[in-house]
Image (spheres, rainbow, N blue to C red):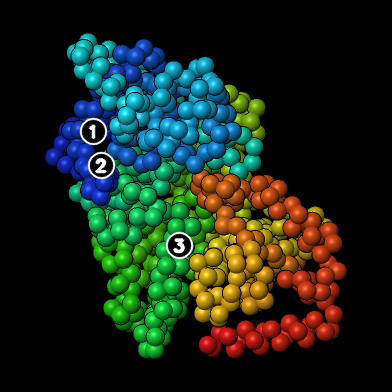
Amino acid sequence: MEIKRVFDILELYKNDYSELTDAFSYKDKGDWVNFSAQDYYKYSHLFACGLINLGFKKGEKIVTMSQSLPHWNIADMGISLAGMVHIPIYTTLGPQELDYILRHSEARIIIVSDAGLYKKLKPVADKIDAIEQIYTFHHIEGITNWVSVIQDAQEKESVLMAELEKRKQEIQEDDLHTIIYTSGTTGNPKGVMISHKNIMSNALAVRDIIPIDHGQKALSFLPLCHIYERMLNYAFQIKGISVYYAESLGTIVNDLKDIKPHLFNSVPRLLEKFYDRIMSIGKDLKGIKRWIFFWAVRLGTKYSENGKNSGFYNLKLSIARKLVFKKWIVAFGGNIVAVVSGGASLQVRLAKLYTAAGIRICEGYGLSETSPVLSVNPMDWENARLGTVGPIIDGVTIKIAEDGEILAKGPNVMMGYYKDPETTKTVIDEDGWFHTGDIGEFVEDKYLKITDRKKEIFKTSSGKYIAPQVIENKFKSSSIIEQLMIVGENEKFVSALISPNFNYLHRFASKHKIRYRDNAELITFPEIIKKVQKEIDSVNETLGEHEKIKRFRLVCEEWSQQTGELSPTLKLRRNKIYTKYDNILTEIYGHGADKTEDMGKDKESTSIESRITNGMRKLMNIKSDKD
């Protein structure tokens, strides 16, 4: 059958996948709860009838704020069937952003998953006259549950089903399906309008690239309000793949062991977390086991970018897989075929290492405005290159502008920004090209490679261009650095603000008998600063003179979505970080140059005495590495 509208997927569950007992699953009180294909089809239609029963008309807006649950999928399909517009929002949003989105979207009702989100959202919703009702997915005493919408519809099901069929016939592929509010690293979120055609063309284009099929399992742990996870969930549904929703990010390791998935979607930061966890295990090993572990890791990072390795390398790799990497596969559940990575750039070193270990990384690229995928690396090595985001998907055209910006055209490009035609004109030109804001290039005239964000490139006071993400990405495999942000716009030199990996620092402090009251005191110890300086020095060796980090400052806070430094997609919110650490930036560039005990000094301005001291510190670092 031809799939043009999102809800056309339901016919596959009725006709092709009706035997599927675990179409969707989630964990409740320690047990997995399954929703069958028949459940999905039946309750999606009943929820659509319930919305019609409530008086909703085509085009009206409904907001959901929920963890990933099968309930979300049913609500999503019901909203789609009845011709309404689904607006899913992140559970981590603060009151100001919630107020803006609820007012801007003109939503009539909201569905939240649990009591915590209800308490968070209700005070905001109470101030907005357009909000008529808040429903919950989970049963909470005294709060209206979404099941009541379905129950009310069942009383006059035949009449409502007839009306629903009329509605379905009226819905066209170019109609608005959803509004995705961007995470807003700067300013208010923008409402990206996505039609049925936008997102279905994308799901169908990546369908054959997904290396698993009906009867196999995918673990989902990214938010369903994220366009990347949502579109791939649609693609999974088209293929009849069972989707299991992780309980939380903290339960992923156990969830992998529980369900033994064949695939999961990830963002680079989570793959880096997995890497850090594995490395910490390796560092606890002793003697020959430790040597073999790190020999295998070094070997893995030399894996060929095109998958074509020498016979001798493959022989060594087979040994490494038997001795070390087979345990990594077990940690990922034992059945893993591939991990799809998107949302940001993955360090090529990690892509090589995971692939060498037998965990194939299929890295892709896209934006909310492109529904989202523009390019992706498939499993087929003839059409894949590690270190790139792969070839362009079918139906999409990409060109590189004179200034290096990636421009895109295709059926997946958004309808525009909701209530904002002027901003829409700034990103979609008269010829229909969407300006991504990303800088890139083609490798071998086929594979797209992202090099930076256009709007984040800045100049130093000497007129030299700095691409911060290129430098920041070099620290992604660091054990001691959790997050790093490059600064120095219009300044004499480049510096960095660093949120360290405090778990690592606590272990390091214990090993070296460093006593401290709190993290604020811990980051002041010379031993800690020297460890970080060594990481900086190592990366500086790979950079041009004008790009080198001359100074850095450690901060005592862990950066997160909750505290505002990271967006829901785990990107740096640069403006907020600049504001939060304005005093530190002033100290670095305003009057910090005269200090002789400056962590990460500008080496060009240091005295002979301090140079000798730095030389001694390097010798000390060499010794400590041997311990």
Q: Residue at x 71, y 57 (%)?
A: 487
Q: Quadrant of residue 115?
A: top left
Front residue (pair 347, 136)? 136
Specify few, some or many for label 2: CA neighbours under 10 Å numbering under 14, 14-19, or 20 or more: many
607 relative to 461, above or below: below
| Mark nearer the N terminus (1 vs 3) | 1
Q: Residue at x 41, y 20 (%)?
A: 133
Q: Locate the N terminus and report the quarter of the image it occupies.
A: top left
Please provide percent x and percent y for residue 179: 48, 30
Q: Is disc 3 placed on a helix, strand or loop?
A: helix
| Mark nearer the N terminus (2 vs 1) | 2
Cβ–Cβ below 8 Å for labels 2 and 1? yes
The three-letter code of the residue at mark 2 reads: Phe
Q: Is residue 512 visible?
A: yes
Task: Say how many tags the image has.
Answer: 3
In 3D space, how far apart are the residues under numbered discs 1 and 3 (Cα atoms)? 34 Å
Residue bearing mark 3 = 273
Front residue (pair 159, 615)? 615
Specify few, some or many for label 1: CA neighbours under 10 Å numbering under 14, 14-19, or 20 or more: many
572 relative to 173, above or below: below
Q: Which mark is residue 40?
A: 1
In 3D space, how far apart are the residues under numbered discs 2 and 3 (Cα atoms)? 26 Å
Please provide percent x and percent y for residue 70: 29, 38
Residue bearing mark 2 = 24
In 3D space, how far apart are the residues under numbered discs 2 and 1 (Cα atoms)? 8 Å
Q: Is disc 2 placed on a helix, strand or loop?
A: strand
